[in-house]
Structure formats: structure tokens, C-alpha cells
Image (cartoon, rainbow, N blue to C red):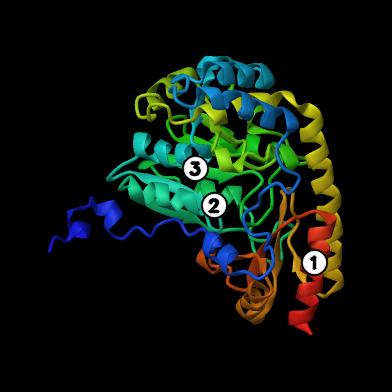
């Protein structure tokens, strides 16, 4: 027998694969009624009509490789965000890019810094690259941003060996955020050779007055990298399209490891069309805002602690009964995201659904908590 684990690189040997929470395909096959899937932060309003039309139009070319450069989408993104196409690299979702930044810029003997309760992929990226992960403690549970990023704590764990810092704004899985002023002060103190990767997967949902995208600071800080995705607000999770915006020299280095044709033809076409459909994006964001506030209020009325959120999900504290409640909800066809893997075992993450979906969730929750 071959011990393939022993043959793997050191960082891979103890690496655990990304945990999606549930085997949804198996659960769908077993379910007596359609599942209510509120565990993956998908957009319940669906993709733009223009994006769907673009997908159909692109099907006739499915036998041909997609544009290896993704030129049309890059140019559309550049126009939208006020940068040059040379500032952009495309990814098979932002997940791929988050992994590749560590692959390219960190390795054995290097350190990667991230926040406690940050997105699980940051730790995976560091370990897969063979780097040492240094976690900064999160803000306390009684803070205005419970379990959110503590920017001072992040600064404190940066050392001469640090190559990358991963942050998210807003953060997954907590839904919390930090202000534009706080981040600007943080970035001014980070050594210029340390790359700061800001994951803005949920940026389109934000309406907090103190928030601003890190993209506004790109011109001043060449060590700043911002990642975005079409999976959330643009409702293209099934097509896996993400991108990063950074200094063109950084992007040029990243292009060396980007897989050929890493974004498929349907994804390229749909993302470009979705980017142009401002009306659909605005409707999705507005719908999410109304339902997020309503759901948060309904959960608090039931005596539950709900973290502040600027995303399309809520982190809800359920105490020691969290795992029991989650299992009982699964039995009723309601799928939420357990948080034990994040060290938040007393919490569940709930995707904000439509009014109808949220009503079904609350009815099921009342049953299991009775």
C-alpha cells in the first residue's frame, strides 16, 4: 500500500478539506419536500434576466475554449471600479484567488496573519502553502461588533516573517464590519512589504454609513489587494466567477499561476451581463436589506442574540442547544450552517431568504424551540 499522505507536502498532511456544512445533494434526494436551504449565503432572488440570456447565447459556443484572458469581463470590471484591466485577475470564484495569494507569496518559514472567526479559507490557504498561520483574537462577545475583526490585535501579531494578512469586510461568518477610518489607520501601520488581502465578497450588501470599500485606498497602498465575487449579490454562485483588484505588478505575478481557462465561457458571459444589470442588483440588495432587518427583529423577539450584519446572513447565538436545534431543523427540511468548525459551536449562520422562506424558517424554529 502507498501512504499518499506521507508523500504529500508537509502543509497538506494535516490539512482538512473545506467543510461545506452539509451534503446538500444527498439531503435533496432524501427530502420528502423541497429543502429550505439557508446555509450557503446564496441570493434567493436569482440571477439577472440579462445574465440568463447571456448564458443561453453562449451555449452555442460551449465546444470552444473560453477567452483565456477574460478580456471583455476585465474591461467591464475596470470601467465599473475605475481601474485598468491590468489591475484585475479573474478567478474560479474568489476562493481560488484567496488560496493562490498564499501559494504565490508565502511558504515555509513565512507567516500569514488572519483574524479569529475569519473565513475558513484563509487558514486553509496558509497551511496549504506551508506557511505558519498566526491568528489575532477577535473582538469580545460584548463588543458592538461581537467576534468581529480587532484591527489593533491584527497589527500586534504581524512580525518580520509576515507575508500576508487576510481580512474580510464585512466578515463571514459573523456579518460584522469595520469602518473606513479604522481600516485606513490600520493600513498606514502595516509594513509596505506585507500584502493585505481584503475579502469583500459581501460588499454590495453594505449600507452602513461608516463603511467604504478598500478599493478607495488602492492607489495609495500598492500592498493592498481586494477580492470580490459574483456568487453573492450577483447570484451567480453556480458559475464560480471571482476577481481580485491590485497593483498591476502584483496581478502580473498572479497570472503566472492562474490556471488556463479558469473561468468558463458561461461564467464570463453571465458575469459581464450581470455587471451591466444595475436594476437587478439594486432590487436584490434592497430585498435583502428589508428581509435581513425583519428576520433579525423576529429572532430577537424570540429572545435570541443576533449579531449586527451588513451581509445577506445573520449569526445567531442559540447556546448549548444549537446543535440539537440545527439537527431538528434539518429533519424538517430547513438547512442552516453549523458553526462548530469556526469555534462558534453555540451559533448558527442563517442566510437571509425571501419573506416566504423566512416565514417557513421561523415556523420551524418555533416548533423545535417549543
Q: Are marks 3 and 1 in contact (CB under 8 Å)?
A: no
Crowding at dot 2, Cα within 10 Å, few <14 / some 14-19 / many 20+, comes out as: some
Crowding at dot 3, Cα within 10 Å, few <14 / some 14-19 / many 20+, comes out as: many
Depth order, front residue of 219/270: 270
Which mark is drawn over residue 360?
1
Residue at mark 3: 95
The N terminus lies in quadrant: bottom left
Depth order, front residue of 180/186: 180
Which mark is drawn over residue 86?
none
Among numbered discs 2 and 1, the one appearing first in the sequence: 2
Residue at mark 2: 119
Regarding mark 3 in the picture, which secondary structure is present there? Answer: helix
Q: Are marks 2 and 1 in contact (CB under 8 Å)?
A: no
Among numbered discs 3 and 1, the one appearing first in the sequence: 3
Depth order, front residue of 155/332: 332
x, y (%) of residue 243? 54, 31
Q: Is residue 150 above or below residue 343?
A: above
Is residue 67 at all visible to an observer of this figure? Answer: yes
Q: Residue at x 34, y 57 (%)?
A: 15
Amino acid at each position: 500500500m502507498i501512504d499518499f499522505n506521507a508523500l504529500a507536502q508537509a502543509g497538506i498532511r494535516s490539512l482538512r478539506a473545506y467543510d461545506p456544512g452539509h451534503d446538500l445533494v444527498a439531503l435533496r434526494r432524501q427530502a420528502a419536500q423541497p429543502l429550505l436551504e439557508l446555509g450557503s449565503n446564496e441570493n434567493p432572488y436569482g440571477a439577472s434576466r440579462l445574465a440568463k440570456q447571456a448564458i443561453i447565447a453562449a451555449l452555442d459556443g460551449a465546444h470552444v475554449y473560453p477567452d483565456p484572458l477574460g478580456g471583455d469581463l476585465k474591461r467591464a470590471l475596470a470601467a465599473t471600479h475605475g481601474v485598468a484591466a491590468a489591475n484585475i485577475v479573474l478567478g474560479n470564484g474568489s476562493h481560488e484567488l484567496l488560496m493562490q495569494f498564499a501559494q504565490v507569496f508565502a511558504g515555509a518559514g513565512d507567516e500569514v496573519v488572519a483574524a479569529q472567526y475569519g473565513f475558513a479559507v484563509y487558514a486553509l490557504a496558509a497551511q496549504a502553502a506551508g506557511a505558519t498561520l498566526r491568528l489575532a483574537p477577535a473582538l469580545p462577545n460584548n463588543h458592538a461588533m461581537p467576534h468581529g475583526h480587532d484591527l489593533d490585535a491584527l497589527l500586534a501579531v504581524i512580525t518580520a516573517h509576515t507575508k500576508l494578512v487576510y481580512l474580510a469586510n464585512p466578515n463571514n461568518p459573523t456579518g460584522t464590519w469595520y469602518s473606513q477610518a479604522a481600516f485606513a489607520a490600520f493600513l498606514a501601520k502595516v509594513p509596505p512589504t506585507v500584502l493585505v488581502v481584503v475579502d469583500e465578497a459581501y460588499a454590495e450588501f453594505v449600507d452602513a454609513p461608516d463603511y467604504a470599500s478598500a478599493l478607495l485606498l488602492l492607489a495609495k497602498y500598492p500592498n493592498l489587494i481586494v477580492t470580490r465575487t459574483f456568487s453573492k449579490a450577483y447570484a451567480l454562485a453556480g458559475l464560480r466567477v471571482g476577481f481580485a483588484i491590485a497593483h498591476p505588478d502584483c496581478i502580473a505575478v498572479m497570472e503566472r499561476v492562474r490556471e488556463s481557462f479558469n473561468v468558463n465561457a458561461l461564467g464570463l458571459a453571465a458575469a459581464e451581463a450581470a455587471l451591466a444589470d444595475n436594476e437587478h442588483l439594486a432590487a436584490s440588495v434592497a430585498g435583502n436589506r428589508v428581509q435581513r432587518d425583519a428576520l433579525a427583529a423576529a429572532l430577537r423577539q424570540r429572545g435570541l442574540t443576533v449579531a449586527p450584519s451588513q451581509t445577506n446572513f445573520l449569526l445567531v447565538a442559540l447556546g448549548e442547544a444549537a446543535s440539537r436545534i440545527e439537527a431538528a431543523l434539518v429533519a424538517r427540511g430547513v438547512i442552516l450552517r453549523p458553526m462548530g468548525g469556526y469555534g462558534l459551536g453555540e451559533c448558527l449562520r442563517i442566510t437571509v431568504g425571501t419573506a416566504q422562506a423566512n416565514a417557513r424558517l421561523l415556523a420551524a424554529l418555533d416548533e423545535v424551540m417549543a
